[in-house]
Amino acid sequence: MPVRKIVITGVLAAIAILLGYTRLGFIPVPNLAGNATIMHVPAIIGGVLEGSLVGALIGGIFGLFSFLQATTPVFKNPIVAIVPRLLIGIFAYFTYVGLKRVNEYAALAAAGVVGSLANTIFVLALAGIFALIPWEAMIPIIPQAIAEAIIAAIITVAVVAAWKGIESGAGGAKKV
Amino acid sequence: MEEFEISRNITIGQYLALGSFIHKMDPRAKLLSFALLVAAITFSASYAANAILLLVVFALVPFSKIPLRYALSGLKPALPIVLLLAALQILFYTSGFAGGANCVAFFRWGPIDSNTCGVQLAIVSAARFVELLVLTSLLTFSTTVTELTLGTEQLLVPLQRFNFPAHELALTMTIALRFIPTFAEELERIMKAQVSRGADLGGQGRLRFVQQTRALLPLIVPLFLSALRRAEDLILAMEARCYVGGKGRTHFLELTLKRRDVMALFAVLAFTVALLVFPLAF
């Protein structure tokens, strides 16, 4: 692993952990899950910027911390807490690479949405398989999943566009 | 200004220096034992196995000298969700868990299907949660983050033969832990900057999530950008010093496996295998 990848992984993982510690990464919502989260966004951004391995590692570190600090039974299961998080960055990376040629912005937004949905879907699927949440009880989580995906897309576009200095005419920051 | 004091209120890791048997264990043996016990908990679904596991986990607490109050500190905030999930499990679980076809139904009405399997699932899930809560507390209260990182690295070293980046992974963890306080300070500065420009960072409240999300963006985006900028500096510094990781690197701390570490590990291994191999009827 080149130095660049190691450092970017460490730095973005630090943000994911910090968002958890400060509770800033949790947005309280009125449903069973209790919180919408943006803690998976560093994994998406890592995947987009430095490739699938970096994205997977950031997700793995985020998952490990979410397992060790979990306050709900769902994430006190190592498989539910860690495995889906490895996939966030991988899905985000391949979405971004696939769509980059069409439109950079669209690719970034899509990577945010896909990475976020990968997190939600795989966590819920494993929670369902491990019988932690009944399938019927997952319906109220759908609006939250959509909201998380939109927030992740906005942050991904804002951060990566600003970082890469993509020319955007009217100014990238204002669009967001 | 108190709400912006982030860096002061952050404690990384929850280490309690108590010098107990579990504290003094070699981090490699401790991590392996932890993983084995987590596997045992995750894969046992019967009442009897979970009763045994509960006993074992609570019996381990005195070995760490950690006050039980500390070990169970995560339980109270989680209680509402645990109870809610239990209620859902009892109401909706049709079959296919543990007892399988041996479920005895209480009543059925539309999608609601209440049976003994649902009850067993609810009780076992709650027990598992308590077991894992105590076990992770034991690990995090008795091991410093440095020990955890070093232990993980040493455990993964054999995989380096297959090009698995064990050393790099440990370095990544170290960098992450090193930067958390820095970013906390950075976040504090960004918050103050935004508030001084009239930003409303939003109060807490379950029904204000749109406002909260909107308030979050002017904090998160600058935080990411400043983090990436710091990353560039660090990359430059490391490359300028010709950093090469991996093979041949020595450590400041050298781990030595003592006899009691090996014995403790074997005891845990024997227990886990016994619990998972022998079927418990109830």
Image (cartoon, coloured by chain):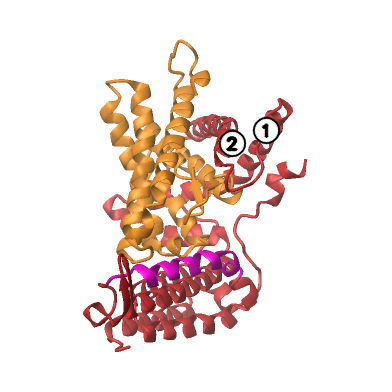
Chain colours: A orange, B red
Residue extending furthest toward the bottom? B281
- Residue A100 seen in the current view: yes
Which residue range is magenta in the image? B73-94
Q: Which mark is residue B211?
A: 2
- Residue B255 seen in the current view: no
In the figure, is residue B150 to the left or right of B63? left
Res. A54 image quadrant: top left
Q: Chain of mark 2?
A: B
Locate residue B264, reporting x and y percent: 45, 81
Residue A21 lies in the magenta-colored region: no
Locate residue B198, reporting x and y percent: 71, 27
Q: Chain of mark 1?
A: B
Magenta stretch: helix, strand or loop mostly:
helix
Q: Which mark is residue B200?
A: 1
Q: Nearer the viewer, residue A39 or B176?
A: A39
CA gap, disc 1 and disc 2: 9 Å
> Is B221 above or below relative to B20?
above
